[in-house]
Amino acid sequence: MCRHIAYLGPPVPLGRLLTDPAHGLFRQSWAPRRQRYGTVNADGFGVGWYADQDPVPARYRRPGPIWADPSFTDLARVVRSGALLAAVRDATEPGADGEAAAAPFADGRWLFSHNGALRDWPDAVAPLAAGLPPAALLSLECRTDSALVWALIAHRLRAGEDPAAAVSEPVRELAAAAPGSRLNLLLTDGDRILATAWGDSLWYLADPAAGRVAVASEPYDDDPRWAEVPDRTLLTATRDDVLLTPLKEPTP
């Protein structure tokens, strides 16, 4: 389900990361190489990016396949950024919620994407949803499992929780409530990337000397420096460092 990527580094055209590479997100929308669930990611796409002197990212999202939007190719050719998050979507329920269901989701300076699915949605996680303030539930952009995952994380971020805990604790809670869920998450504020490998592929390409890092569902090229993140792992990355921390399985 879905493919996504986050990047921090020197400003580059969005297309340098998304449409130009031989196996970039654009091609992954119809020919992913390492996707374990689903084969075509044509149920929406989006990209969020940060501009100089503005901490709040811009977003461009559409409900259809990325290859059917010629305007995006033009945008990606000329818009430059030193930080972005982008995703192509394979919907759990095709057609549900349209553009509003396309990642990245946003709150203030944060961008978020979920690659995966909650098992037995929505019944299994109803108790977790009930623990959110009514305002958080009413402000959900759409009625998908990914939107609920984001609501759980965003609630913790707004409360001032450390971002690593704000990502990893909901993963453990959701995995306990709905065993077998796939919870590969991607979060950035333009200065750092947090990601989880939980049930699907995750890779990173780090170049500290150049101040550059990319974290993605799968490599967008054949650079031998790409490294796979072990399953059940939290990744925390900045432009010059990557930290991998094992995530403990929830207690039965």
Image: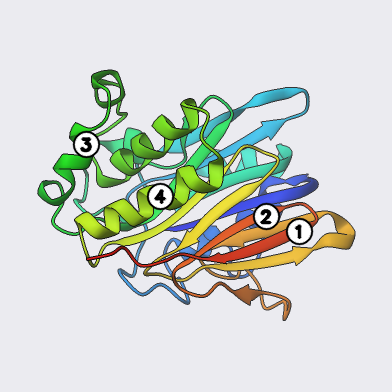
Residue that appears at 32% across and 45% down: 146
Please state if 20 lies on the left or on the right of 169 as rendered: right
Give how far apart the Cα atoms at labels 2 and 1 are: 6 Å
**Which amino acid type is marked by label 4?**
Glu
Please state if 244 lies on the left or on the right of 140 as rendered: right
Name the residue carrying label 1: 241
Q: Tell me the tag on residue 129.
A: 3
Numbered disc in front, either 1 or 4? 4
250 or 142: nearer the viewer:
250
Numbered disc in front, either 2 or 4? 4
- 10 Å neighbourhood of mark 4: few (<14), some, or many (≥20)? some
Name the residue carrying label 4: 169
- Say what secondary structure mark 3 lies in: helix
Name the residue carrying label 2: 237
| Residue 123 visible in this rendered orientation of the protein | yes
**Which amino acid type is marked by label 3?**
Ala
**Which amino acid type is marked by label 1?**
Asp
- 10 Å neighbourhood of mark 3: few (<14), some, or many (≥20)? some
Mark 1 vs 4: CB contact within 8 A: no
Give how far apart the Cα atoms at labels 2 and 3 are: 29 Å
Q: Quadrant of the N terminus?
A: bottom left
